[in-house]
Amino acid sequence: MADEQQEHLKHLSEKLAERIRSEWPTYGGHDVRADAGDPGMIYVALRGAKRDFDAGEAFSGELESLLDGELDGEPEAIDFAISLGSTNKDLLLQIELRYV
């Protein structure tokens, strides 16, 4: 992938992680943590929600709506995928942004 695209995905990931943090400091009674990772990756944790898959599924729907709206304004087509998993304590949502 071109350096320009990598840099754009990095900037977009950081912008979206910040938006998630500001819009949802908590969700379903759980604190939310959102961080940008590698270009195109956003990691979201519902703190203490290890087995609360209903909250994870609902939050995933909220994130889909946010991402659809944010990515519609992009000059190039960018798609996303959201994965759901858990750790010892938290429920994790991984968002991957990619050019199509």
Image (cartoon, grey):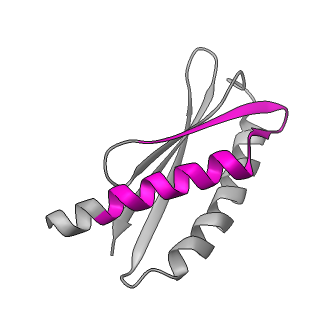
Q: Which quadrant would residue 3 be assigned to in this image?
A: bottom left
Residue 7, position in %: x, y? 26, 61
The front one of 40 and 92 is 40
Residue 14 belongs to the span the image colors magenta = yes
Tell me: residue 95, above or below residue 85.
below
Residue 87 belongs to the span the image colors magenta = no
Tell me: residue 91, above or below residue 61.
above
Give the residue at x 78% y 30%.
Answer: 30
The front one of 25 and 80 is 25
Q: What stretch is highlighted in magenta?
A: 8-36
Q: Which quadrant would residue 44 be assigned to in this image?
A: top right
Tell me: residue 91, above or below residue 11.
above
Give the residue at x 14% y 67%.
Answer: 2
Give the residue at x 63% y 63%.
Answer: 64
Tell me: residue 14, above or below residue 55.
below
Residue 45, position in %: x, y? 60, 33
Residue 76, position in %: x, y? 36, 82
Residue 69, position in %: x, y? 62, 75
Give the residue at x 40% y 73%.
Answer: 78
Q: Which quadrant would residue 9 be assigned to in this image?
A: bottom left
